[in-house]
Image (cartoon, rainbow, N blue to C red):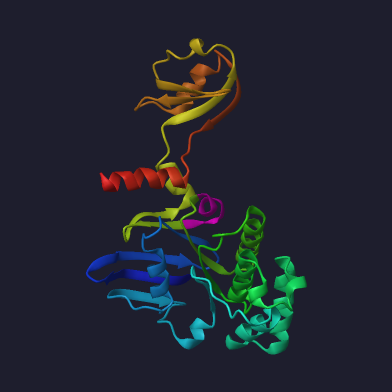
């Protein structure tokens, strides 16, 4: 089931094109990554999806229709620009925000305490927001995003400013939400986080789509024609094989680049009699490496 769909959406400010004719969809129950460098147009895209700003052209459907008040209550949004009522107590603020989304006070209190426990913040529930550190405030805002049990969770740079421990806490909760059938849109410039978490991604640069699809498919499509090999024996016994174009040494292992027209299987068959293989894997670039390559190509 498609939860979100954008068709030929564009947006500009002061005659500058911010989003240029993008189309994509997000399926129920997946973690969908909206990726790109700072200034790529990610936040503008999110704001159009959530009806905060209007596109100049194109159509946006959420839960199969135009966004209405009932649909908005089914969405949790963590904006990149954080902001909480500084004078409010943590527990009171969370309950209030949950009630705005239609939740009863009793249920809101239960959810607030449970989520505070999950992010190791329950002992701070009666403190004012202004008494908390920046990282603690960020965890409270994340709780506010999901406290009402939204079907669609949209988080813009959720790990920004968090230490590794708290990053892992938030990541674990997002994965639990996915396991519960929720749909998550993760907007970030941190490619390694997206690579670890996302089922599919949309990567934009200068307002245009440069990558779109399943993470594994994208990585396979852009992988080098090379393998990593750790072995016992003499490298000279195979470095002159016809299939090999180049060999780069990396400490205890080598990366072997295969000539065009040759495949990995035939190379392995020729190497096996010559050395004892300890580890072998096909080289696959990271999303970060793929994006840098594509971005450089677009600017050249």
Residue 122 position (above or below residue 89): above
Counting from the top left corner in percent of width and height, residue 236 is at 49, 10
Taking depth in this image into account, of 157 and 81 the one nearest to the observer is 81
Task: Choose top left, top right, bottom left or bottom right for residue 55.
Answer: bottom left
Q: Is residue 285 magenta?
A: no
Counting from the top left corner in percent of width and height, residue 5 is at 40, 71
**Residue in view at x 60 percent, y 64 percent:** 178
Q: Is residue 193 magenta?
A: yes
Taking depth in this image into account, of 92 and 133 the one nearest to the observer is 133
**Residue in view at x 60 percent, y 79 percent:** 86
- Judged from this view, the residue extending furthest toward the right is 123
Taking depth in this image into account, of 12 and 9 the one nearest to the observer is 12
Residue 81 falls left or right of residue 145: left
**Residue in view at x 46 percent, y 47 percent:** 287
**Residue in view at x 52 percent, y 28 percent:** 228
Q: Which segment is the magenta one?
A: 192-200
- Judged from this view, the residue extending furthest toward the left is 15
Residue 272 position (above or below residue 100): above
Residue 153 falls left or right of residue 257: right
Counting from the top left corner in percent of width and height, residue 271 is at 51, 17
Residue 60 falls left or right of residue 107: left
Q: Give the quadrant of the C terminus.
A: top left
Counting from the top left corner in percent of width and height, residue 238 is at 48, 14
- What secondary structure do most residues of the magenta stretch adopt? helix
């Amino acid at each position: 089931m498609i939860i979100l769909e954008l068709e030929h959406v564009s947006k500009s400010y002061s005659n500058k094109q911010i989003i240029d004719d993008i189309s994509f969809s997000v399926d129920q129950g997946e973690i969908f990554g909206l990726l790109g460098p700072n200034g790529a147009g990610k936040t503008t895209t999110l704001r159009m999806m959530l009806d905060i700003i209007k596109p100049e052209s194109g159509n946006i459907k959420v839960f199969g229709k135009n966004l209405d008040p009932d649909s908005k209550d089914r969405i949790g949004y963590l904006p990149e620009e954080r902001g909480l009522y500084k004078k409010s107590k943590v527990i009171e603020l969370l309950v209030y925000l949950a009630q705005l989304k239609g939740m009863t006070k009793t249920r809101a209190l239960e959810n607030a305490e449970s989520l505070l426990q999950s992010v190791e913040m329950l002992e701070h529930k009666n403190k004012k927001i202004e008494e908390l550190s920046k990282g603690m405030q960020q965890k409270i805002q994340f709780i506010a995003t999901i406290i009402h049990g939204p079907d669609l969770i949209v988080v813009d740079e959720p790990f920004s400013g968090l230490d590794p421990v708290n990053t892992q806490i938030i990541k674990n909760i997002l994965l639990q939400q996915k396991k519960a059938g929720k749909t998550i849109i993760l907007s970030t410039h941190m490619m390694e986080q997206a690579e670890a978490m996302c089922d599919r991604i949309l990567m934009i640069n200068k307002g245009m789509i440069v990558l779109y699809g399943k993470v594994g498919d994208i990585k396979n499509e852009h992988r080098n024609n090379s393998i990593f090999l750790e072995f016992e024996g003499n490298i000279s016994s195979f470095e002159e094989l016809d299939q090999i174009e180049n060999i780069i040494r990396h400490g205890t292992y080598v990366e072997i680049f295969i000539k065009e027209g040759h495949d990995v299987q035939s190379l392995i068959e020729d190497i096996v009699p010559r050395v004892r293989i300890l580890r072998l894997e096909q080289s696959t670039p990271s999303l970060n490496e793929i994006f840098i390559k594509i971005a450089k190509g677009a600017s050249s």
